[in-house]
Image (spheres, grey):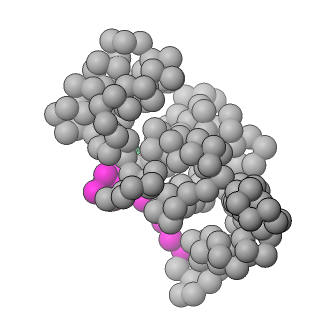
Amino acid sequence: REFAEISIKDIDQIAKNSFPLCMRHLFEKLREDHHLKHGGRMQLGLFLKGVGLKLEDALAFWKAEFSQRISMVLFEVGSERFDKEYAYSIRHNYGREGKRTDYTPYSCQTIITSAPGVGDHHGCPYRHFSEENVRAALGKMGITNRAVEDVMDKVRNIHYQLACTLKFEAVNGTSCDAGINHPNQYFSDSQKVLQ
Ligand code: SF4
């Protein structure tokens, strides 16, 4: 599932325009806290690989964020610590370490059935957020009240991927007849609309 290459300098704009709620939430938390726990690093990291972030750019992207955090916490430049603790698992996701498996990004099904714990930001917001938090997240995207209510209706009926599809349609102003079944499909369909 690899699409066109993306570069780090465009990533904030791309996240705003074309990331589904699950990835947008992880991305914003990473920018805010300069940290994500393991489940979040896996979910977002593999998604970014799928949207076309090359290994070298992925290492630079995560290092820039985590180094800020490490500097804040330990008052030291965290380059060594990053290389020791995190770079290995990023290279691993790209199939450059261990068994050299080229790991694929998680599907909606996998994300929806994951079980985020306290302090985790991975998972599917439609499944794992409170109703209030889903509303707040949708509200920030300028979606009309009517569309928000339609999404909430699907959430209450446990149709999380349909909720995501309605959000896609509201944001992109176009129908998505196939429905959303993968965050990277959400991304590529959204990019197609923008082109
Ligand atoms: Fe992400 Fe899929 Fe949930 Fe949409 S339905 S927010 S793409 S996990």
Which residues are the magenta region? 102-113
Give percent across and percent down for residue 167. 40, 28
**Left or right: where 78 falls relative to 19:** right
Q: Which residue is at a point 62% across and 49% down the rendered structure image?
A: 33
Give percent across and percent down for residue 142. 50, 17
Give percent across and percent down for residue 31. 65, 45
**Quadrant (top left, top right, bottom left, bottom right) of the C terminus:** top right
Can you say whether 95 is above or below 190 in the image? below
Whether residue 105 is in magenta: the answer is yes
Can you say whether 145 is above or below 166 in the image? above
Can you say whether 33 is above or below 39 in the image? above
Q: Is residue 15 visible?
A: yes
Whether residue 96 is in magenta: the answer is no
- State the residue in front, 150 or 63: 63
Q: Which residue is at a point 46% across and 38% down the rendered structure image?
A: 21
Give percent across and percent down for residue 52. 64, 54
Ligand 1 image position (quadrant)? top left
* Residue 110 picture quarter: bottom left
Q: Which residue is at a point 56% across and 57% down the rendered structure image?
A: 36
